[in-house]
Amino acid sequence: MKIAIIGAGFAGLASAKVLSQFGHEVTVFEKTPDVGGVWSATRRYPGLRTQNNKGTYCYTDFPMPASYPEWPSGEQVQQYLEDYARHFDLNGSIRLNTEVLSAEPKGDEGWRLRLRDVNTGGTMEHEADSLVVANGIFSKPFIPPYEGREAFEAAGGRLCATSDFHDVEEARGKHVLVVGYGKSSCDVAAAVGEVAMSTKVIARELLWKMPRKILNVLNYKYLMLTRMGEGLFPYIEQRGFERFLHGPGKGVRDGMIKSLQSVATRQLKLDKLGLVPEGTFDRIARSTVSLATDTLYRQVEQGRSEVARDCEIVRLGQEGGRPVADLSDGRRVPADIVICGTGFQQVVPFFSDALQQRLTDDEGNFMLYRQIHPLEVPNLFFCGYNSSFYSPLSAEVAALWIAAYLMGDIRLPALEERRAHVRKRLRWMQERTEGKHARGTNIIPFSMHNIDEMLNEMGLNVSAATRFKQWLLPSNAKDYRSVTRGLLKRQRMRSKSAERPAPDLRGRPAA
Ligand SMILES: Cc1cc2nc3c(=O)[nH]c(=O)nc-3n(C[C@H](O)[C@H](O)[C@H](O)COP(=O)(O)OP(=O)(O)OC[C@H]3O[C@@H](n4cnc5c(N)ncnc54)[C@H](O)[C@@H]3O)c2cc1C
Ligand SMILES: NC(=O)c1ccc[n+]([C@@H]2O[C@H](COP(=O)([O-])OP(=O)(O)OC[C@H]3O[C@@H](n4cnc5c(N)ncnc54)[C@H](OP(=O)(O)O)[C@@H]3O)[C@@H](O)[C@H]2O)c1
């Protein structure tokens, strides 16, 4: 098949590699000048590194170099992805600086894409049998529509997203506000805090954060990147040991969560700094489970930065020709730069409104079976819409699921059954996360459940012994090397049996 792929981040590259391994002719369209997506030089903020340790943030058959540290830098991850594209000979299939302006179905026959060369502005067309959307759920930043932005900018103020803030020197000697309390905001605030005249984090709600090293000793991967860590949070359906943890063993489970809460509170000195979030530590899994940016808490303790809690920017503006911001706590503060880590928009602007409506429910949530396959639009797949604790692995397994589907190897439930399944999950996600599920695309913390479900449907899950080991040890990507081999073997067997002449009516092979 001719397959077009939109995006060359982890998900797009995994799709390109897997689908070409299975004999498809792929073309990847990427609007930036480099591969990497989140890790591209065009999007990295100063100090960005992975939350995962390197063994859980890579593809199954391409480990990160031994020379990389436990938590690689943004630059190293981008280099890793370039190396991956070169190693698997993908560069000839990737068209950089090429934006997909529109993609429309040609009846049930495939897709027609309209493309724009970002350098020349020239447009062109491309046709494909199938389309994989891998445009990233954390790719297009959201910036609140602040009143007074024009006057603020006219006075020399800069309003930008964390993903558009690349050079910390820009903040030297300036007054900086960082909006939001997610990982992006806290990281950028910590970087800026080293050089700015003043740094304020404007957090409308504090969140619980996990220290990278618990008690400054134990790598958090042994707690959160294991099946046990995932099992601490109740999944939509519970089986085996999870049933125990959320039934008779609930006391043990609650005790573990409570210990984590008191360790995080003590280690980050949250009490002393007045930064204890509302509710219990359970709420860390409400949205993305982010790691704590230790430096930020140190800077707050030293009085070099401030976290304005339960606070928002009410309006931007100017006073005496200088840019300022009015805060909901009644203060007017100087604000040369306002950097928003206020999340991302999950959008597919290259689809018509009518097509977008067919892909989403009334609330705009993506209605995707297994987070991959739309219910009603044929020849279309999404990769990376199961953002998880192990996004590269989740994306690669999704790409393998697509390959298996195209081989005719996935037996889908009937349409109405799939619709009910997706609706039930979205309802559960909505309740569980208080609406913070990125329109149904962020499955954290249930990464391994999602991987199990895809692999079980393909009949290719890893051995029970490996899964058992993952209860106590981090689920490394390399544990899943065998899946591609298994599926390729199946494809070879199928093509061999297709070549074999059909048996005669008595069941004997034909002469
Ligand atoms: C700052 C940051 C750090 C993160 N760190 C981690 C982490 O440590 N661990 C973890 O598990 N997850 C992490 N995540 C989640 C992260 O989203 C994934 O890990 C992963 O990198 C996403 O890959 P992706 O390919 O799905 O999307 P992206 O990396 O966003 O790639 C999408 C690509 O599509 C391109 N594109 C979009 N629209 C078009 C178009 N119309 N035409 C052409 N190209 C287009 C974009 O330019 C982009 O290159 C992080 C997210 C962010 C924002
Ligand atoms: N590798 C890394 O170190 C790394 C770095 C960055 C990001 N990430 C990952 O990338 C994903 C996105 O993280 P993120 O930090 O960019 O975004 P995020 O987790 O979505 O956090 C957005 C923050 O902005 C706040 N916010 C949203 N809209 C707002 C508004 N209108 N006004 C004021 N505040 C607003 C949110 O507050 P509410 O909670 O009140 O909505 C939240 O604090 C996560 O999965 C994260 O783990 C990883």
Image (spheres, rainbow, N blue to C red):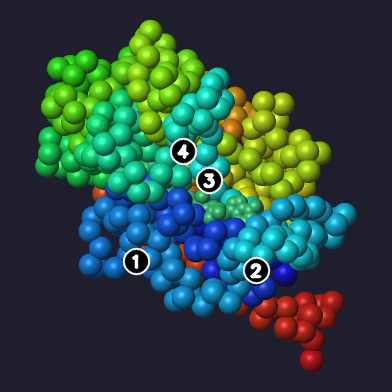
Q: Tag 2, which secondary structure? A: strand
Check disc 2: other Cα within 10 Å, few if <14, some if 14-19, many if 20+: many
- C-alpha span from label 3 to label 4: 11 Å
Label 3 C-beta lies within 8 Å of the nearest ligand 1 atom? yes
Q: What residue sits 38% from the left and 31% below the top?
A: 336
Q: Which residue is mark 4?
A: 161
Which percent across, then down, holds residue 72?
Answer: 29, 56
Give left or right: position of 430 versus 251. Answer: right
Proximity of marks 2 and 4: CB atoms separated by less than 8 Å: no
Q: Tag 3, which secondary structure? A: loop
- C-alpha span from label 3 to label 2: 20 Å
**Amino acid on which disc 1 is placed:** Pro
**Amino acid on which disc 2 is placed:** Thr
* Residue 63, numbered label: 1
Relative vertical location of residue 107 with respect to residue 356 in this rendering, above or below:
below
- C-alpha span from label 2 to label 1: 24 Å
Q: Which numbered mark, 3 or 1, is in the foreground of this view? A: 3
Q: Which residue is mark 3?
A: 139
